[in-house]
Image: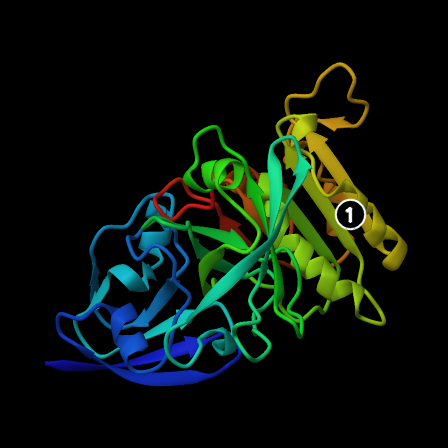
Amino acid sequence: MTHSVALNFADGKTFFISVHEDELLLNAAIRQGITLPLDCREGVCGTCQGQCESGAYEQEYVDEEALSEGDLAERKILACQTRVKSNAAFYFDHNSDICNAGESLKIATTVTAVELVSETTAILHVDASSYKQPLHFLPGQYARLQIPNSEDWRSYSFANRPNATNQLQFLIRLLPNGVMSNYLRERCEVGQTIYMEAPLGSFYLREVERPLVFIAGGTGLSAFLGMLDNIAEQPNAPAVHLYYGVSQEADLCEQQRLHAYTERMPNFNYQPIISQASDNWTGKTGFIQDHLNKDQLAEQAFDMYLCGPPPMIEAVKSWLGDQALQNYRIYSEKFLQSNTSRL
């Protein structure tokens, strides 16, 4: 048996696909040339989230970090875990143009540099010019990188904007025993090949229509660097306030680059916040939600983007709910601890 399914997107476009009785919704979409944003395919990351507007369906495994009980009650779904049981319609809260025709690209890139930007963070620079045309991705999206001589892949947000020569950057936290971290510390050499799958993800900078609030936790900053690169090129850059939270001063990175944005964008404000600050730190301490200003946010409509660990994102969303603020839109990307996590 085959069901007719409508896929509706935030830009108003609709695609109709056929889904076999035992076929996952994500697989059916890809089979027909619509690559919904995806990452883990295991019901963990939440990247392929949508909402059923009509019809019957069943879901297999859904991690509580991806969809809460409240989300499930609102008929939110993960396309990678959904089997439709009737004709149906699903809504996805992103534009259709990030659904590439066919599979995402797999490209051989070349390491050009590894730059230590803090005691705990590095930027991996790669050359993707083997792909003979400019790589199209949206600021905020990410790529999967294969650790050389292994079957392991890790996901990282692009830390710069698209460019004609396909020179790419990825901000990577150096963990004590992470597979990518160990590779960068012990075996990485300029000229080595790293295979990349890109572009991926539904977290990206939408059309800017009002002031922006960016909230970054740790290497979640990476996605915002690409967004800020893009915004800084606009003739009338909007007001942007970046809150950047880390555990310790040693975790802060790209400080010179962030301060340079203030010179390029008069309406850019940047606030670093340390949760476990030393006695020498004279800036803001605690958690990001402790420093959000309800009165300022209530003055006008705004778009908020959050990228970082799930506890940070949930804490900020909870704070917003408690303040009963209105007239804002929120977009978020969680870094999850899984075999596809951004480590």
Relative vertical location of residue 84 with respect to residue 149 in this rendering, above or below: below
Q: Position of residue 326 (x, y in %)?
A: 64, 54
Q: Quadrant of residue 280?
A: top right
Circle 1 SS class: helix
Left or right, 27 with reference to 141: left
For the residue marked with disc 1, what is the amino acid? Leu
Q: Give whichever of 75, 229 is nearer the camera.
A: 229
| Residue 303 seen in this snapshot | no
Identify the residue at image location x=15%, y=82%.
2
Left or right, 124 with reference to 240: left
Q: Position of residue 75 (x, y in %)?
A: 32, 60
Left or right, 330 with reference to 13: right
Q: Quadrant of residue 239?
A: bottom right
Identify the residue at image location x=50%, y=69%.
94
| Residue 21 seen in this snapshot | yes
Callout 1: few (<14), some (14-19), or many (20+) C-alpha neighbours within 10 Å? some
Identify the residue at image location x=23%, y=50%.
61
Q: Position of residue 263 (x, y in %)?
A: 89, 54
Task: Classify the position of the N terminus by image quarter.
Answer: bottom left
Residue where numbered disc 1 is placed: 258
Q: Give whichever of 27, 178 is nearer the camera.
A: 178
Q: Position of residue 3 (x, y in %)?
A: 19, 81
Identify the residue at image location x=65%, y=32%.
251
